[in-house]
Structure formats: C-alpha cells, structure tokens
Image (cartoon, grey):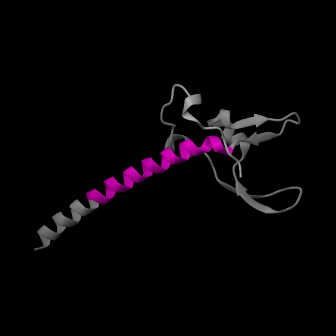
Amino acid sequence: AYYYLSDASLKMDVKLAPGLDVITKLNGVEFKWRESGEKSYGLIAQEVEKVLPEAVKTDANGKKNLNQGVLTGPIIEAIKELDAKVQKLETENAELRDRLERIER
C-alpha cells in the first residue's frame, strides 16, 4: 500500500480541487504492456500531463511517471458534482410525475 503525506498542518492555500472540468478531459484506457503483453487499465501519462501537469514526472530515461494520488481530489469533486446533478434531476422528475398525476386525474 502507498501512503501519501496529507496532514493539514503541512498545507496552505487549501481550496476545493477541480472536478468534472478536469476529469472529463481524461481517458481511461485498456492496453497491453509491451514487455509482458499483459492486459491492463489506466491512463496515458502524456494525456494527463496536458490536464494536470503536477501529476506527471519525467524520469532520467525520458519515461513519464504518473502520481495517481493527484487524481484523487478531482475524482472526488467530480463525483460530488455528478451526485448534485442526479439529486436535482430526481427532484425535478418527482415534481413532474406529481404534476402529471394531477393532470391525469
């Protein structure tokens, strides 16, 4: 397991992370590793770098490494944004059903 230092006492200028506007620009992909041929799922570091450059580091060999922990904040905020939209739509749907029921009586 990987643990990332996250103590509040070490942070400043804290604000909510971007959500859907970042996450919708990323593509989850299925791929095979060239070396083993093993199928896997993930992201392409070069694509992530365009959206969240702080999540990508280039090593001494020029290969891109992805810190997936950086994606956690935006993913959580995107889920919260989607949840708010679903709740709003459910409320609107219930109101419309009530109106329709009254009309059909």
Q: Where residue 66 sits: x, y (%)?
A: 72, 42
Residue 44 appears in the rendering: yes
* Residue 56 found in image quarter: top right
Q: Where residue 32 sits: x, y (%)?
A: 80, 59
State the residue in front, 73 or 48. 73
Q: Residue at x 61, y 43 (%)?
A: 71
State the residue in front, 75 or 11. 11
View extreme (bottom): residue: 105
Q: Residue at x 10, y 74 (%)?
A: 105
View extreme (top): residue: 13
Q: Where residue 79 sits: x, y (%)?
A: 48, 51
Q: What stretch of residues is rendered in magenta? A: 68-92
State the residue in front, 63 or 3. 3
Q: Where residue 68 sits: x, y (%)?
A: 67, 45
Q: Residue at x 48, y 36 (%)?
A: 16
Q: Residue at x 38, y 56 (%)?
A: 86
Q: Please state if 44 lies on the left or on the right of 101 as rendered.
A: right
Q: Please state if 64 lies on the left or on the right of 102 as rendered.
A: right
Residue 82 within the segment the image draws in magenta: yes
